[in-house]
Amino acid sequence: MSSSLCVVGDFAWDVLIRTNNNLLKGGDSFGEVMLTPGGSAANLAVWARRCGLDSRFIGKIGRDRFGQLAREDLEREKVDHYFVETDAHLTGSVAVFVDQTGERSTVSGHGADFYLIPSELPRGIIASSSHLHLTAWSFFTDPPRSAARMAAQIARQNGLTISFDPASFQMIGEMGVEQFLSWTKDLAIDILFPNFEEGRVLTGCDEPDEILHKLAEIYDQALIILKLDAEGALVYDGKTTTHVEPTTNNPVDATGAGDSFAGAFLAHYLESNSAIEAAKFANKVAAWVIEHLGARPKPDARLRQTILQR
């Protein structure tokens, strides 16, 4: 039986703004302004599907033009979508500012994706999948936290494995680490995808090895994939730490790098059960992504060849 991924979380439209200089207060500047599909959860579902994994997405959108475009986007990406529509809120949107180094900062609006409630979950879709992915963007407020936790409960009851992305070191800090852990450490997470800053905030440690061991204590039995940006990634299986080398030094836009990494990793790992090979593959995909603008650039021949070679 082939693996299938179910992702519960956010779909939002990114207003991407990139400049080649520093913005001055009250000043003006030329740059690039793009509207692109996004949302951490939706991005991951798309990248997993692009990398060959059967993917399903559950989220909430407004009954508006952007909501219609969201459906069209996931249909084009061949991701099965189960959207809840609402008249009460607009489809989500995020302002993404990319500086001249490729680093990005975001401002997220509270769109429809923040109002998913447990009764709206299509339980059968979750239960019939083999793996559930959640992102911390579904945990910073309630709703949608209760819906995300219910999705995890359904997954556990039906024998699914679960992965989780901590999503934002700043939001974790503002919520409070203990509060954040109280909502997430009982989810029975099998795979955790923190980056270095998220790991440092969650553990209070400054060294990658210390972060890995502390996270393994917090999220018992979880496979930890610590993303280190330009330094690659560390894979910790509870016994051994393996460094996976980076594959690029040409960052243009870091938007969606973590989502593409996790989506590619799951597409490989759920079929191969090899965390090291999955991380190597995910590094290649994420490296291609950060060399282009937006969280989901259109694949070219080079990326298609990388995916075929996996």
Image (cartoon, rainbow, N blue to C red):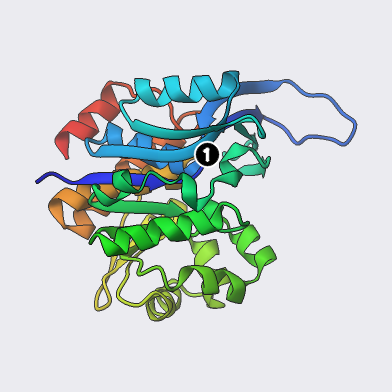
Residue 186 position in % (x across, y down): 42, 73
The answer to which of 172 and 287 lies nearer the viewer is: 172
Residue at far right of view: 26
Q: Is residue 192 visible?
A: no
45 relative position to 89: left or right:
left
Please identify the quarter of the rendering in which residue 250 is found: top left
Please identify the quarter of the rendering in which residue 66 is found: top right
144 relative position to 5: left or right:
right
216 relative position to 309: left or right:
right
Residue at far front of view: 119
The answer to which of 261 and 70 lies nearer the viewer is: 70
Residue at image point 63% right, 33% down = 93
The answer to which of 65 and 290 lies nearer the viewer is: 65
Residue 26 position in % (x across, y down): 90, 31
Which quadrant, please, contains the C terminus? top left
Residue 136 position in % (x across, y down): 52, 56
Residue at image point 45% right, 73% down = 185
Residue at far left of view: 1
- Placement of 2 over or under 222, stated as above or below: above
Mark 1 residue type: Thr
- Placement of 199 over or under 140, stated as above or below: below
Residue 94 position in % (x across, y down): 63, 36
Q: Is residue 240 visible?
A: yes
- Placement of 64 over or under 269, stated as above or below: above
Residue at image point 28% right, 63% down = 157
Secondary structure beneath dot 1 equals loop
Could you classify mark 1 by the number of other residues whose Cα lies within 10 Å: few (under 14), some (14-19), or many (20 or more)?
Answer: many
* Residue to which mark 1 is pinned: 255
